[in-house]
Amino acid sequence: MKGAFATSNRARAFGCAALDFGEVVSVLEAIIRLAQRLPAIVGLGISAPIEHARKTIDAALRSLWNGYAKRILLVGKPETFYELGAIDPSLIQVVSDDPESDLVKLLDGEANAIVRGSLGASKLLAKIKSKFKLPFLARLALLETLGKHRFFFAPVGIDEGRNVREKLYFISEGAKLIQALEYKPRVAVLSGGRTGDMGRDRRVDATIKDAEAVVETAGQEISNIEIKHYEIMIEDAIADRANLIIAPDGVSGNLIYRALTHFGGGTSHGAPYLGLAKPIVDTSRVGPMNEYVGAIAFASALVTQT
């Protein structure tokens, strides 16, 4: 399969044995293993405030030291680099008055993949959507609970996952990625309430109906997956070791992501965009350094090698 997500044959070729989806450490280890064996040239956005820029630098250096990337191109404004001062010469500086545009342009030649880093979201999203001529963008976050269960999660953008069709797209593309890592997709679809709550609120009713439609359609159209409607009980989905969880909508998904990673003791390892010809991995501007390191490794692992 061409594009950002390789087939399971690629993972198998690099020594990733078939993994049981209940193994809590193997997802990230499989990504790191691929990144180290096929390190890529990665473009990384960098911007003020200075604490975000320094975090980006630290993550880039750690990624190089760990062999997660072959080379890292830092794309940022002149004032950002001026405020940082001297930077380790192993990092390549790309000075730009429009770093969002120039970061995306790197995919046309110098970079195999790009990571948002500490750049703002809105302008970069618009550039990606324009370049790839997509009606909507979809990101799939790799999250980790305090108990070390790792799972893919969507939607995380406030304008994503708005209907059944978009949720089916997350499941279809997410299943390809999980299978490429030698897992069997185990999908949990969430809604705004229990089925017994039907009739209490029209908005909740709609999420329950959507979730049931998603489960029914995905079960018929997407092969080799397990899928279940977990209603509002995300804790049961985690307990059952689901490796792909679909939130009711982008707003609730973004809140779950923030609650888990910012004060719930969990971690994010980046969020690749789905369905693109080249790998792009998203990060939060306020995310910790480890999120940036994971995103760089993820980007490198997703590069299709020919």
Image (cartoon, grey):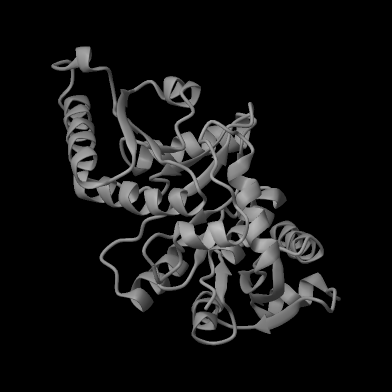
Q: Position of residue 284 (x, y in %)?
A: 56, 52
**Displayed quadrant of residue 132:** bottom left
Q: Is residue 3 left or right of residue 117?
A: left
Residue toward you, 10 or 137: 10
Q: Position of residue 247 (x, y in %)?
A: 36, 36
Q: What quarter of the picture does the N terminus occupy?
A: bottom left
Q: Is residue 117 left or right of residue 224?
A: right
Q: Position of residue 55 (x, y in %)?
A: 74, 57
Q: Is residue 12 above or below residue 147?
A: below
Residue 203 appearing in the image? yes
**Displayed quadrant of residue 265:** top right
Task: Say which residue appears at 61% left-offset and 37% top-offset.
Answer: 262
Task: Point out the residue furthest to the top here.
Answer: 196
Residue toward you, 178 or 297: 178
Task: Say which residue appears at 71% left-offset and 74% top-offset.
Answer: 70
Task: Say which residue appears at 54% left-offset and 87% top-offset.
Answer: 109
Q: Is residue 221 above or below residue 193?
A: below
